[in-house]
Amino acid sequence: MEFIKRINRQQFAFLFCCLLLIALIYSKFMISVSMIALLVISVFHLDFNKSFPLGFNPSLKSNFLNLFSNKAYLACSIFFFIVLISGLWSEDTPYWLERLRIKLPFLLMPFAIISIPPFSERQYMSLFYFLVILMFFSSLIVGVNYLLHFETITETIKRGKSIPTPMHHIRYSLVLAFSILAGIVLWWKKFYLKYKWERYIIGFTTLFLFYFIHVLSVRSGLFVIYLSLLFFSIRYIYLTRRYKLGIATILVLIVLPLIAYKTIKSFKAKIDYAQMDMQMYNQGQGKDYSDAERIISYKAGIKIGNKNPLFGVGAGDLKKEVQSYYEEQFIDISAPKMPHNQLISTYAGTGLIGLIVFCFAFFYPLWYRNNYKEALFASLHLIVFFSFMVENTIETSIGVAFYSFFLLIGLNYLSRKENELSV
């Protein structure tokens, strides 16, 4: 009890943030528990000096005022309201309610996070330190399992399957890619918790994760990490004018996939499968191959959006419209795929107006008060935006949790820097 008394609201929040990071990888249920816990500590207050210790947070009113005065936090809630408003022209109410449920963290979590006293730079970096170490041990477990069943799993990769991961392999690869960028930033900033030599552990861990993302060979993760590293290399050249080092880095990024193809069996199997996949699609026989299904889903989303280009068919009716499209155009495909592109899905469901509002909501926090200058905050937006090209990133509870958590924690930390500059 004495230990609990000594923990303040910010320390409680930090513990639940760490728990949420673990939940992102291992438990959908714990994601909800962690988010609810963060919301609870923002609304209620514990005071053990009183006979009844539980009461409302005395800062409740001021936190609401802070929320409505911070436009970056408010922009986050737009993702929820886009789906909410599209219900006006959605007939499939159950599916529309399901979409709303998934987007609910965008409405509730901004208040939960703005109610936490702003994290210091050390606390903020510590979360990413924990993420990198967490992903390192998780990757070790995945890797050991792969080695124990090497031949069996490699054969399944040749048929378009993936190495078993604690959560959906695509989401896992995106978290892994973000962890690599986080490790690079931690190394660059020379961050450590207690001992300077920890920096070398972070460096080794980051290199291992970069190697492992090639072993995992999930193309979505590889796509976003290479594009992100390319972007940062170009940005480095622009800011420092160190052309030789920057160009050398870009050349290394070009050569590394070729080396991986020659040395990593799972990577080679995935690339060979992708080539066969596209050949089958070009021959009109790709209905049972993942890349062909992805391209077909893009076309479906665009065709559906074009039915009502301004407002879309309604987020609630998108699934029904996709099924109708497949029944008309691809009757031999038994399992229709939703558009594997967040922007196309948004266009199909809410039209050009919805897509423009969606893009505003996504980019506004990045440009708000020059937040793009913070490396980890910019890294998050790079990873998530590039993932939009190949996935419905925030149409799943894990995707929403991943993006909303790091977005809002970043805004929480940046608010401290804003306050320090204004003093």
Image: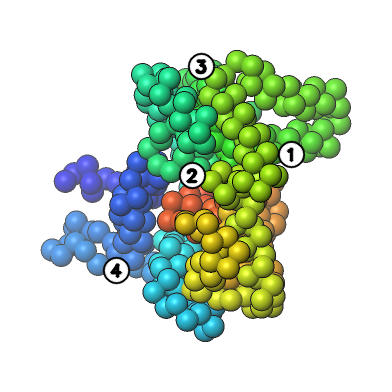
Give neighbour class at mark 4: few <14, some 14-19, many 20+ (Cα, 10 Å). Answer: few
Q: Nearer the viewer, mark 2 or mark 4?
A: 2
Label drawn at residue 231: 1
Q: Residue at x 86, y 27 (%)?
A: 243
The disc at residue 197 is 3
Residue that extends furthest to the bottom in the rendered view of this protein: 88
Mark 2 or 4 closer to N-term? 4
Residue 66 visible in the picture: no
| Tag shown at residue 171 | 2
Tell me: residue 71, above or below residue 252: below
Q: Nearer the viewer, mark 3 or mark 4?
A: 3
Which one is closest to the eye, mark 3 or mark 2? 2
Q: Which mark is residue 282?
A: none
**Residue occupied by mark 4:** 56
Q: Are marks 4 and 1 in contact (CB under 8 Å)?
A: no
Mark 4 element type:
strand
Q: Secondary structure at mark 2?
A: helix
Q: Does the CB distance between marks 2 and 4 fall below 8 Å?
A: no
Q: Nearer the viewer, residue 194 or 390?
A: 390
In front of the other: label 1 or label 3?
1
